[in-house]
Amino acid sequence: MSEKLLNWDEILIGGAIKDPGNSKSYETGSWRVERPVWNPESCIQCMFCWVYCPDSSILVDENGKMAGIDYDHCKGCGICVEQCPTKPKSLAMLLEAEAKGKSEEEIRKEAFSK
Amino acid sequence: MALLNELAKKKEGLVEGHRLCPGCTHSVIMRQVLAAADTDKYDIVVAAATGCFEVSSGLYPYTSWNIPWIHNAFENAASTISGIEAMYRLWKKKGRTDKDIRFIAIASDGGTYDIGLQALSGAIERGHQFLYICNDNNAYQNTGNQRSSATPFGASTTTSPNGTVLQGKSQPKKDIMSVLEGHHMQYLAQASPSNWRDLMDKAKTALDVNGPTYMNVIEPCTTGWGFPSNKSIEIAQLAVDTCIWPLYEIIEGKVKINYKPKNKLPVEEFLKPQKRFAHLFKKGNEHLIKEYQGQVDKHWEWLLAREASGIGY
Ligand SMILES: Cc1ncc(C[n+]2csc(CCOP(=O)(O)OP(=O)(O)O)c2C)c(N)n1
Ligand code: SF4
Ligand code: SF4
Ligand code: SF4
Ligand SMILES: [Mg+2]
């Protein structure tokens, strides 16, 4: 990510940052080796994945329901998969290399066929 | 506590894009605290001590905080929040603000049990209204896992290594809850991100106390403790189920245990999945595990006895 560095006289006193939450524009998704894949069919909307995600990467709709994964920021830690209580799980990990170039449907099939 | 679906609708106080390791629980804890806080009723200001969480969430020119946040130095999160809280009270008195603001100081074990202890003690004694949260990951993790007084017995760190002379840390962990309890504050609690409902209840309670409060929260560190990133919550749960990390409150000096495992697991269950304890499972080191189990049992039984006594101040 390229960004313009500030001159010393442009920096606010105390090193203050004016834009709350501006780290959203920093994409940590590129760190990922594996990705969690979601299966909405078996999901019971318990939101455990949301409450345990270290990277606020469980997408939430206006009703407070699980709506997918934010792949721009998800670091692929796998906590959501471990904590998903359904049997079989409604989240599964898939290597990024295996997801590359595939459609969402193909990726889901691949992740849950294992 | 509201349903998770309700909480998930709230605007998050801590957002994505921070540089904590994958699977780090520093952010999990803070997300739970901020989800629990009654932010319709009050605003929150956070002061952070130096450490992994601070450097990762405030890496200039970025911030992952959607709420006012300040970092000063390693040893003085409690002093920093004291100053802000004192100014707020003055402003309120002078009519410069009518906002309801609650204050949180956040640090890890290095910044709490060790270098920040003096500032914390002073701030509590002066009676500022703030919640101090220690995310205890058992060592100085940001500088690469050096032992602290919160490092448990037997754990290998770069400054309490295992080798031919030492077998990891030879001293037991400091009981910080007892140290701070001596300030006779109204509310202290120990919590774990694995038990999110309990943690949220405690944060909400603490934020409503008109005075200093303290929360000691276990913060599993995948990098320093040596376990896979997807196991962070399980490790926290194992600490709770072995009674290595009991969930309890001290309310006006009275101990209340919030969770008594039906099946108290042996400490091995917590130790085994972590590299920092691997040497304890070598032949000839059985006595070290036994000693650790003894420390854990003794503390647990003491807590049970204190609860049963019902004595407060
Ligand atoms: C006065 C001072 N001494 C040393 C340091 C270097 N330092 C930065 S972070 C850190 C360790 C922090 O440990 P802890 O408080 O446990 O937080 P963690 O990184 O484990 O979350 C140290 C020693 C510093 N910033 N300031
Ligand atoms: S893999 Fe980790 S970072 Fe990604 S969504 Fe799951 S819990 Fe969040
Ligand atoms: S943890 Fe599993 S079941 Fe629960 S909301 Fe997430 S995906 Fe759905
Ligand atoms: S070293 Fe540990 S505490 Fe620090 S960011 Fe990584 S996992 Fe978190
Ligand atoms: Mg630490």
Image (cartoon, helix red, strand yellow):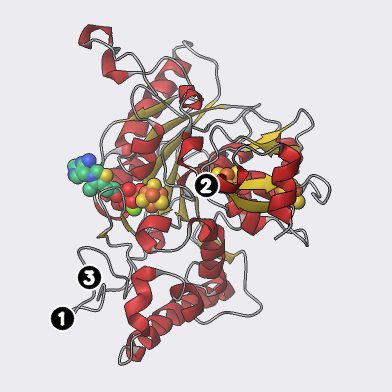
Mark 2 belongs to chain: B
Is residue B108 visible to the viewer in this orientation of the structure? no
Position of residue A40 relative to residue B102, above or below, is below
Mark 1 belongs to chain: B
Mark 3 belongs to chain: B
Q: Amino acid at mark 3?
A: Pro
Question: Which residue position is annotated with label 1?
Answer: B165
Pinpoint residue B128: horizontal percent, then vertical percent: 40, 36
Q: Amino acid at mark 2?
A: Ile
| Nearer to me, A63 or B292 | A63
Pinpoint residue A62: horizontal percent, then vertical percent: 77, 27
Which of the 4 image quadrants contains residue B74? top left
What is the C-alpha distance between the residues marked 2 and 3?
29 Å
Dot 3 surroundings within 10 Å: few (below 14), some, or many (20 or more)? Answer: some
The reply to whether the C-beta atoms of the residues labelled 1 and 2 are less than 8 Å apart is no
Q: Are marks 2 and 3 on the same chain?
A: yes
Q: Residue at x 44, y 12 (%)?
A: B94
Mark 1 or mark 2: which is in front?
A: 1
What is the C-alpha distance between the residues marked 1 and 2?
37 Å
Residue lying at the far right in this picture: please name it: A41
Pinpoint residue A11: horizontal percent, then vertical percent: 28, 12
Question: Which residue position is annotated with label 2?
Answer: B29
Tell me: B28 left or right of B129. Answer: right
